[in-house]
Amino acid sequence: MTDDTETNQNVAVDVDNFTLRNNKLRNDAIKNDNVDLLFRTVRDAGRWAFGTVFVEVWALNEDGTKLFRPDGGWWLDENYHMASLSETTLDDLIPAAPLAMGEGLAGVLWAESVRVNPAVAMITNEDNRNIVWREVNPIANDPDQPHNPRLKTIAKAGLGLAAAVPFNIRGTMGIVVYLARETCNQDKLKAPSNERYLRSAATLIGAAYAIRAPHTAAVLERKKEARKTFVKAVENLKTMKRLEGSSSMSVQGQEETDYGQKFWNTLRYKVLTIIHKFKGGGVAPPPSFTTKQALVTFVGAFSTLLALTSLNKKLTDEYGGDGRIVLGPFGALMTLQYGLTAAPASQPRNAIMGQLIAISIAIGVSHLNWELWLRQSLATALAITAMVKFGITHPPAGAAALIFSSGHFNWANLGTMLLGNVIAIVTATVINNLDMRRQYPTFYGISPLFDIFKKEKKDEQLERIDTTSLH
């Protein structure tokens, strides 16, 4: 009896030792399979896309606060040398560290290309939406962008164009970042067939990453079942305990399906997420301007406001209140044009269109027979909503909406405001571009209009050719 007990104990010990020896090998094998699957998917996507030489996958972490690049989540064209980003053995390695929203290239592209609704945790990504290719240099040199050595290296390496395609595979969210040479043929890069391929490839890449957790769980479950079968002959007691544990987990899973429990779990998750985000993203503040840059800012703001205040005095003397310029929003505009020169909100398109829409809304709301505080709140909220919807966010326009909703201004004041913005844009263009470190504007945003005209002209030519061929 004693011999049998000792034999069983020895067998149990051997089984445990066998399990310990194989745990690491098993986990490493699972990880390597997952990494290899993702890398092969990313590599195949990059190899057959026109113009793409570097592809990266950035996934949203469980807290929903940062983006990180998973293992195997990148591919670099073998004919394109950029060792500091791809070779992990070099001393000058620049790691792909986790990024907060809006930080680095991936963070900026995430903020611009992905609309996240935290209430339902989903991404709206229409398949028919064009992929937006951004120039990397303006992002890398944006004074409002936190310092990011990796972003600077990408810009210096000649990867001048970048685009991001978001994915959401059953709640696993992220983006696929495609980078191309700044010298590539942009017509072919932006061709519908190439963009369809990039969108489809991003979905496949997202699936390859999203399957990691289910794949690991499935493999571990199969291994667990095999181990149970092997151990059952000598560890009946341990097997019963494991079955009891599995039973308790099953009961717990059934309890969590209750709607009330789901509600509290969701509420708890959201509260913890808010608290975690409240601590900040850990991004370093932007560097201060040099004395020369600060002096350029002073000259630009002073000169522009001097011109506007002088013009406002003449208009007021000539036409009274109907001709005056509301100067308050121009203080904010000076801060944008000379303090955040490359920011999208500073550009002419946002300034003109933002003011036009915001003031028009405010004047319309001012005719409502409501209390002043209610008109001001409604007009400003509607103006901001319209600006973000049409992609023309402009903070001074929000201030203008608040002022114009008072009912003391009319459409003539709108005209003088637009005139003031044109003067400010011309002045900012001259003064900012005197400095080699500045570029203003970075875009006008009117190229889509020309694209429409080009498309209509092309359609007319094709129709003319078809008519000729019929005759």
Image (spheres, grey):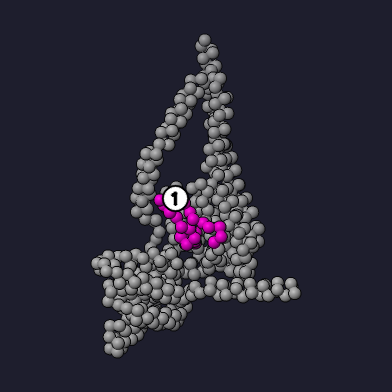
Which quarter of the rendered picture does the C terminus lie within? bottom right
Side of 27 relative to 333 (left or right): right
- Determine which residue is flagged by label 1: 121
Observer-nearest of 184 and 153: 184
Above or below for 80 versus 25: below
Give the residue drawn at x 53%, y 12%. 3
Question: Does residue 126 show up magenta in the picture?
Answer: yes
**Amino acid at dot 1:** Ala
**Segment tinted magenta in the rendering:** 105-129
Q: Secondary structure at mark 1?
A: loop
On the image, which quarter does residue 314 sit in?
Answer: bottom left
Q: How many marks?
A: 1
Q: Residue furthest front?
A: 471
Label 1 CA crowd tier, 10 Å (few <14, some 14–19, many 20+): few
Q: Is residue 2 left or right of residue 193?
A: left
On screen, residue 356 above or below 218? below
Q: Is residue 142 left or right of residue 72?
A: left
The image position of residue 373, as x and y in percent, is: 25, 66
